[in-house]
Image (cartoon, rainbow, N blue to C red):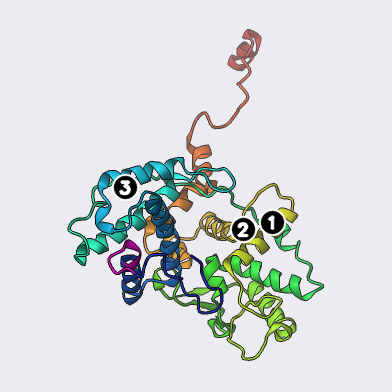
Amino acid sequence: MGRQKGPNKTLVPFEGSEDPRSMAALIAHYFEWMRIRGYSETTITRAWEVLGMFLKWCKERSLSQARDITKPMLERYQRHLYHYRKRNGEPLSFRGQHGQLCAIQSLFRFLAKQNYILYNPASDLELPKVGKRLPRFVLSVSEVEQVLNVADIGNDKGIRDRAIMETLYSTGIRRSELINLKLYDIDDDREIMTIREGKGRRDRMIPIGERALSWIRKYLDDVRPSLMMEPDNGILFLTLEGGSMSQGHLTKLVRTYIKASKIGKIGSCHIFRHTMATLMLEGGADIRFIQQMLGHAELASTEIYTHVSLKRLKEIYLATHPGAKLERKKKRETPEEETEKTT
C-alpha cells in the first residue's frame, strides 16, 4: 500500500481488491461513495489510513470478506487498539481509538445500507469515552512577540515565516486553511480574508489585522516573486522551492520557532489558534464572534475557550469571594485606646 505524492494525490487500492467480494474491494466502493457525497480528500485519506490498519489486522486472522466480521471480532480489534503502541512506544489516546472505531462504524453502516452485508456488526459497538480537553498551552501577548521576533527578517525565509505566523496569530485559521490560501483570498482594501472550503467544506470571510497584512504585503513584494515558478497556481505561501506547503512542513516550521523562542512552551500552528481565541475572549469579544472567526459549526466547540480564559473569572472571584484576598487582621485595640475614643 502507498500514497502517491503530488498535487493530485490518489490512494492506492488495498491488496486483494481485485476480488469483487473482498472487503478491500468493498472499501473501494465506500471511498467512491464518500467522494460522490462530497467528503474532502483529507477525510478520505484519513479513512484510508485507518481502514488499512484494520484490513492488515483482519488479514493476519484470515478474515478477507466483510460478511466474516462479527461484533465479537470488532470488540477484539478494539482491545487491540487499546494495547497498540506507536513507533515511539506511546499508546493510542482514547480520542485516537475513538476516531479509528468511528471510521470502522461508518464503513459497516455503509455496507449494511447498500446491502453488501446482511447486518451491521458495528451498530452496537460501545466506543471509548472521550472527555473535553483544554488546550495544553496558550501564549500571552509577550510570548507571542517573542516567538514572532525569532524569525530573521534579513532573508527571504524569515520574511515569509514571519508573514505566516502573523497570519496565524491574527486570524486563528487552521493549518490546512493557511496552506490553501490563494492570492485573491486576501482583500487588502477591506482587510478581509476569505477561507474557501474550510472544515466541512464551509466558506467564511473573516477580518485580518493591519500588522499581518503589512507582513503579507512585504512577502508578496520582496519574496514571493523570487519563489514563484510558472505556471503560477496562485498559492499565497510557497516553499523555498516554489511549491505548495504540506501540513507536516508547516507544523515543523512553526514548532521550530516556538522552541527557539525559549518561552518554555511547546506547540505549533494550533497554539496560535488557541491564543487568538483566548485573547479575544479576554478582551471582551462575544463568543459567537469567536465561533465565526474559528469556523466552528457548533457553539459547543468554541465554548472550550470560556474555560481557558480565566481573566474574567478571576476578576469576579476576587470581587465576590470573601476568602480570595489575604488581608491583614485588624489590630485589636487596648483598653486605654478604647477609653480615649469614648472621652
- For the point 44% across and 55% down, the residue is 53
Q: Is residue 22 magenta?
A: yes
> Mark 2: which amino acid?
Ser
Q: Nearer the viewer, mark 2 or mark 3?
A: 3
Q: Nearer the viewer, mark 1 or mark 3?
A: 3
Q: Earlier in the sequence, mark 2 or mark 3?
A: 3
Query: Can you see residue 154?
Result: yes
Label 1, label 3: how far apart the Cα atoms are: 41 Å
Taking the image as shown, residue 337 lies to the left or right of residue 91, namely right
Mark 3 lies on residue: 74
- For the point 76% across and 61% down, the residue is 150
Picture quarter with the C terminus = top right
In the figure, 221 relative to 258: above or below? below
**Where in the figure is residue 114, as x and y percent of width and height?**
21, 67
**Where in the figure is residue 85, as x and y percent of width and height?**
51, 44
Q: Earlier in the sequence, mark 1 or mark 3?
A: 3
Mark 2 lies on residue: 268
Label 2, label 1: how far apart the Cα atoms are: 7 Å
> Mark 3: which amino acid?
Leu
- For the point 58% across and 85% down, the residue is 234
**Where in the figure is residue 15, as x and y percent of width and height?**
42, 65
The residue nearer to you, when weighing 288 against 40, is 40
**Which span of residues is magenta-colored?**
19-25
Label 1: how many Cα within 10 Å (few below 14, some 14–19, many 20+): many
Q: Are marks 2 and 1 in contact (CB under 8 Å)?
A: yes
Mark 1 lies on residue: 258
> Mark 1: which amino acid?
Ile
Q: Quadrant of residue 291?
A: bottom left
The secondary element bearing badge 3 is classed as helix
Q: Earlier in the sequence, mark 2 or mark 1?
A: 1
Q: Is residue 52 magenta?
A: no
The secondary element bearing badge 2 is classed as loop
